[in-house]
Image: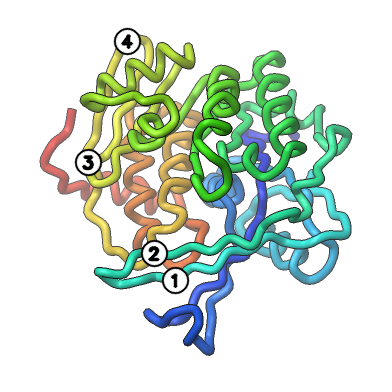
Amino acid sequence: MAHDVLAFGEALLRLQPTGDERIEDAALFHAYVGGAELNTACALASLGLRAAWFSVLPEGPLGRRVLQKLRGAGVDVALVKTAPGRLGSYWCEYGQPPRAIEVIYDRRDSSVCNVRAEDVPGDALRAARLFYVSGITPALSPRTREVALAMAESARAAGVTVAADLNYRARLWAAAEAAPVLERLAKAAHVVIATEEDLKTLYGLGGAGEDVAQAAQARFDVRTLVLTRGGLGALSLEAGRIRSAPAFPVSRVDRIGAGDAFTAGFLWASLTGRAEQALDCGLALAALKHSIPGDALATTPAELLALLERDTREIRR
C-alpha cells in the first residue's frame, strides 16, 4: 500500500537530567527517542496518515528501541535497514533562566551516516504522496547528503510532492557550507518550511516577515514557503497569497520537537483537504508539544480539532 508520507532521517537518543540538574551532577537521566523526520512521522501517524520512515539503524538493543518507538506510534518501519554501527545521541541540559538550554551532540559516524544509494526504497518513494526530509540529514555525512538530495529530486521527478524543513544546525556545519546544499534541497521541494533566523543566517534575508517569505520563495522558486516566527506565529506564501496566524499560548514543559510538530500539523492539513487551516494546525500542534515531555508528539485528529475550536487567540487573518 502506498504511503501518505515517506520520511528519511536520523534517529537519536536524548539523554536529559531529571529536574533542573546539570549534566555533570545528575544521577538520573531520561532517555527519549527522537530525530526531526522521526518526530514528524510519529505525529503524522498518530493523526491517522500512512507514514513510513526510512533510515539505517544499528543492530542491537538501541536500534530495537527506536523501532519499538516507531511501531508504537503507528509508523511503518518495513523500509528501515540495520547494520553494525552506533546510534547517535545528544545530551540536553534544560537550564532555567538565566541558564540556556545546552545541547551536546554525540552523533558522529552513526549508522545512518553510511547509508548507501542501494538502500533507498525507490518503489516506495515513487509511490508515496509526499516525501519529507529536513536540512539536518544532509549535514550528517557526505552519504546522507547525497541520498537526501537524490531522494528529493527523484521524488519530484516522479510527481511526488516534496516537503523540506531547512532546519539549519550551526553545530553540525558552517553556514557557508550549508547554504548551497540547503538551497538545492529547497529547489527540489514543493513546500519549504524555514525560520526567519535561518534564512537570515544562510542567505542574508531580512526585513518584515512577509518580505523574507517573498524573497525566499523567489530565491528557491518554491510553490509554498512557510515561515515560522517563534512567539509571533507563522505565515505562508502560496500562489501570491499570504496567510498568517499567531502562536497559541504554551506551557513550557519541553520545547524540543515543537518545530517537528508544527511541520506535522501543516502537512496533515495539506494532505487532508484542510489547506486553509494548515498554519493553525501546525501552530496548535507546536503548542501541544510544548506541554509534553519527549521528542515526538502523539495526538489524535479529535484532540487537534478540539484545540482549534477552543482557540482564544486575538488576531486571525
Q: Nearer the viewer, mark 1 or mark 4?
A: 1
Q: Residue at x 58, y 58 (%)?
A: 34
Secondary structure type for disc 3 = helix
Marks 1 and 2, how far apart at CA:
6 Å
Circle 4 crowding by C-alpha within 10 Å: few under 14, some 14–19, many from 20: few
Secondary structure type for disc 2 = loop
- Farthest residue to the bottom: give it: 27
Amino acid of disc 4: Gly
Residue indicated by mark 1: 93
Residue indicated by mark 4: 240
The percent coordinates of residue 142 (x first, y second) are 74, 37
Marks 1 and 4, how far apart at CA:
42 Å
Query: Observer-nearest residue: 124 or 304?
Result: 124
Disc 1 and disc 2 in contact, CB within 8 angstroms = yes
Q: Nearer the viewer, mark 2 or mark 3?
A: 2
Q: Residue at x 63, y 27 (%)?
A: 129
Secondary structure type for disc 4 = loop
Residue indicated by mark 2: 101
